[in-house]
Amino acid sequence: MTTRNCMKRRRVKTVSFSVATTYTFHVAPSATAVPSDAIPGVGLHGPPIQVATALVSLDHDPCRSVVGRYSPRDRVYFMKRAGFSQADVTKLCLDHHDIQTSRKEAAIIAWREQAHADCISSKRACVQG
């Protein structure tokens, strides 16, 4: 009798590209960027100011890329360059802190409500005979 391995072999899947297109944007304060620290976020602003296309070389091993993040100091610099005064930046920081606090509180409330609903649904209903 022969034994058979029931484990399926996983094939390695890869994706390769022959052309890369890079879009360049202005950077400005953005409500869509939500950093975890006290300084408000900055992000892409407006239409692209430059579009470049280049062939991708398949000769070298592909490498993983990461998303660039701006430091708090850089974000303050971009806000001041956009015309915000120090008082404006401070007010934005306080508003940002209030938003973060509100989101955390909402997440805790939602978690408690879900835990309560799970607790109630797990109890058996009494059957009257």
Image (spheres, rainbow, N blue to C red):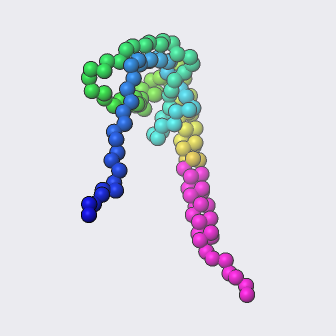
Give whichever of 85, 75 is nearer the camera: 75
Q: Is residue 71 magenta?
A: no
Q: Estimate the x, y position of residue 122 in percent, counting from the top left.
A: 59, 71
Quarter of the image that includes the N terminus: bottom left
Identify whether 23 is placed above or below 86. above
Q: Residue furthest bottom?
A: 129
- Can residue 39 be seen here? yes
Q: Is residue 111 magenta?
A: yes
> Could you say which quadrant of the image residue 83 lies in?
top right
Number of on-image labels: 0
Q: Residue furthest right?
A: 129
- Can residue 80 be seen here? no
Q: Estimate the x, y position of residue 90 in percent, counting from the top left.
A: 53, 33
Quarter of the image that includes the C terminus: bottom right
Q: Residue furthest front?
A: 1
Give whichever of 32, 63 is nearer the camera: 63
Q: Estimate the x, y position of residue 52 in percent, counting from the top left.
A: 44, 12
The prevailing secondary structure element of the residues shown in magenta is helix
Q: Residue at x 68, y 81 (%)?
A: 126
Give whichever of 126, 92 is nearer the camera: 126
- 71 left or right, relative to 119: left
Which residues lie in the magenta part?
A: 104-129
Q: Residue at x 52, y 33 (%)?
A: 33
Identify whether 100 is placed above or below 77. below
Q: Estimate the x, y position of residue 57 in percent, counting from the top left.
A: 31, 18
Identify whether 97 is placed above or below 8. above
Q: Residue at x 37, y 14 (%)?
A: 55
Identify whether 109 is placed above or below 56. below
Q: Residue at x 41, y 17 (%)?
A: 19
- 10 left or right, relative to 29: left
